[in-house]
Amino acid sequence: MNSATIIPLFVIIPLAAAFLISLVGKFIKRSSETIIFISSLALLSFSLYARFLLNSSAGKIMIYKIGGWTPPFGICMVLDGLSCFMLITVNLIAFFVAVYSLPYMEQYTDKPKFFTLFSLMVCGMNGLIITGDLFNLFVFLEIASIASYALVAFGTEAEELEASFKYAIMGSVASTFIFIGIAFLYSFTSTLNMADMARVLSNKQNEWVIPFVGVLFLMGFGLKSALVPFHAWLPDAHPSAPASISAMLSGVLIKTLGIYSLIRIFFNIIGATQGYLTVLMFLGAISMIVGVVLALSQWDLKRLLAYHSISQIGYVILGIGLGTPLGILGGLFHLFNHSVFKSLLFLNSGAVDYATGTRDLKETGGLGKLMPVTAKTNLVASMSIAGIPPFNGFFSKAIIIIACLQKGNFGYAICAVIGSILTLASFMKVQKFAFLGEIKDKFKNIKEAPFAMLFSMVCLAIICIFGGLLLIPSLRFFLDDAVAVILKGTGYAGVVLEAAAK
Amino acid sequence: MILYFLCLILFCVGLYGVLRKRNIVKMIIGLGIMEYAMNLFFVLMGYRFHGRAPIDAKDQNILNMVDPLPQALVLTSIVIGLGVTALVISIAIRIYEKYGTFDITKIKRLKG
Amino acid sequence: MINNPETGMTLIVKTITRLTVGLILLFGIYIILHGHLSPGGGFAGGVIVALSFVHLMLAFGKDVAVSRVSKNLASNLESIGAMMFLLVALLGFLRGSFFLNILAKGSPFNLFSAGTIPLSNIAIGIKVGVGLFAIFLALVVLERSK
């Protein structure tokens, strides 16, 4: 048993939890809550421990060979800086969302089913992050997607079903494109292992296969991550889900399924040329502006937040598309920050919904006096997303803008600044209409949300405040290792195959 | 070569069904056609001329067989397709309960 | 209940079903057990097992099929199948690796060979068989309840 044994646990724990809940959840009272709490806590601690193990491992990479088969033939799991970064992000958010769901899901009928689907979704995301095999990535992507289609429709009201149907159709079409891309890559390279594929591709010349596959993947993963031409499903699907699931979907699902896979395939397998980067930067800038402009006119709190997700994803893609070390650092840091504050905002909207039964900004108002914790955490999150110092959103946006200027892309830098200002305007509206002003008569006797919900929100708010500390030199390894993996490009192949040969 | 183009045509038929049809059941059927077109395409990728099925048997010595890996992958993809189809159909039934119609243009309670 | 002429299809269909449904079930089990020797396996065999129950439901009506396998039993068995598969995979940890085939491989083309693969096939067969039946049942119940 070497230290790499920890890697498959990220798939085993949520999978076991999911089926255990569906088996015993109906018979033993409170068992589903206990199992989900223990499993998500275990996942969070294991992901932090994996980061610790990674520091002490040679070459900062760990390989796990499933069934003892060596990589080009068998499936392997790879834990490097980038996967570790994503694992910590996903499991951190998943833990707080799970704690939040314990009281929040009381208003829905079937808690065990909810937690089963939730665990399956976490399993899909964790598996997607740690796998080193392209088809395995597709399978885990589908596990996470199918669980999320079902979770969006969880309330089975008319709007939720409609949103879920739209999401399921769009998602399936996206998966089809991804599958065709994988089929082409397989027929071209005769291997499915990502590292081996990168090695074969770097030795082969072909003018049309790689760009064609690139376009297919860009369409598929662009749809999954809701970049602007493909964003139509997101503002329907994300607000319709229960608030805790909206937090998961907006916070981590679109990043794992969309951005992580995009980075892994474009940078580490195909090798990012300037053409791809230009397209990514362009899509990022468009998403940034279009998302925030559409958000300005929304009166439904969750729908507004969903449009902001599109806009913030644009920042991440812009940062990564710059291709410079600083830009990628900013992009990844913004990815982490966005998952923290966007899930916090969605949890806040859930708390407002839980207390008042509405999320229409025209009806709420003055909730700050009756729900002080929700109001304060919401203020923190709003300032983070708008990029006000010293909250974490400021640092990541500043890095992205500086990276744009460094590379000479002044137009994109101006777009980023405008997007940030409009975000601030839109969140001032949220503050004014939800938490400030006079309280309406019918909400005179609402109560603050239960303890577990407040606990999650306060913890996430603390991470928002101190998130900027990740940039100080002694903690920067968390981000720097991830950036190093991306910058290595197709050199990833050599590193993985060498580590696997040991 | 013509077989690959037939797959492409089948795929386009499915895509047309998803994008242009107004009845949501027809959209689901379009989705199914699309999935099967790509499965067929992937199996064809593994074909070799004069190859035979990759089944090992006691009394035979196989010299030239088609690539078995795409077949295994397509089986997985079929299972995934089954899951998606079952989920989407159950959602469609529930939609019919709530809206009383299968027409996608009349199912517009969200602002889009 | 079985001979109730009010539910289900005509007498001809019912008689034929009574003759064939056992054979279909048996064929499904055969496919599952020989998954490591011949084409087929857990998924294909599981689908055939599920189809035998669906066949029963189509011919005799919902109640007869549900009296054989109720919805609760189906969903529990499905979870058990999944847990079994995970357990088989976890058994590999005894010798050091996830999904490692720890049992004796035996000689090829015997029924008892290939280590843990038949066990995985049985687990998948249970899961797919009852899972598919549960899906069908759920769709039928959904349609009736409107």
Image (tube, rainbow, N blue to C red):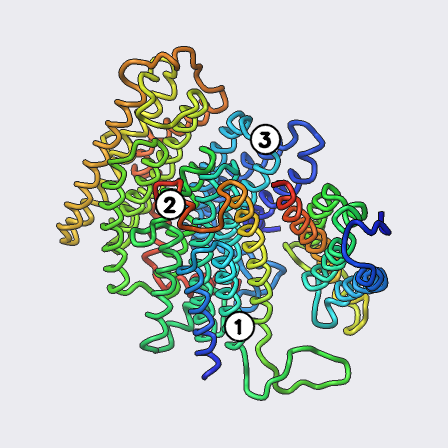
Measured as percent of width and height from the top left, residue A430 is found at 28, 27
Residue identified by numbered label 1: B40
Camera sees residue B75 = yes
- Residue A458 at least partly seen: no
Label 3 crowd (10 A; few <14 / some 14-19 / many >=20): few
The numbered mark 3 sits on a residue in which chain?
A
Image-based side of C62 in relation to A306, left or right:
right
What kind of residue is marked 2? Leu
Q: Residue at x 36, y 42 (%)?
A: A235
Q: How many marks?
A: 3
* Residue that appears at 27% across and 56% down: A280
Q: Nearer the viewer, residue A190 or B74?
A: B74
Same chain check for tags 2 and 3: yes
Which mark identifies residue A234? 2
Q: Any mark on residue A19, and which?
A: none
Name the residue carrying label 3.
A109
- Residue A440 occupies which quadrant of the picture? top left
C-alpha separation, residue under disc 2 versus residue under disc 3 = 25 Å
Judging from the image, what secondary structure is the residue with disc 3 in? loop
Query: Could you tell me which chain the residue with mark 2 belongs to?
Result: A
Q: Residue at x 45, y 54 (%)?
A: A169
Assess disc 1: are there few (<14), some (14-19) or many (≥20) residues with their C-alpha within 10 Å of its C-alpha: many
From what the image shows, is residue B39 above or below residue C83?
below
Q: Tag 1's secondary structure? A: helix
Could you tell me which secondary element the residue under label 2 belongs to?
A: helix
Is B107 on the left-hand or right-hand side of A500?
left
A198 left or right, relative to A421: right
Q: Position of residue A379 (x, y in %)?
A: 30, 24
* Spatial CA span between label 3 and label 1: 42 Å
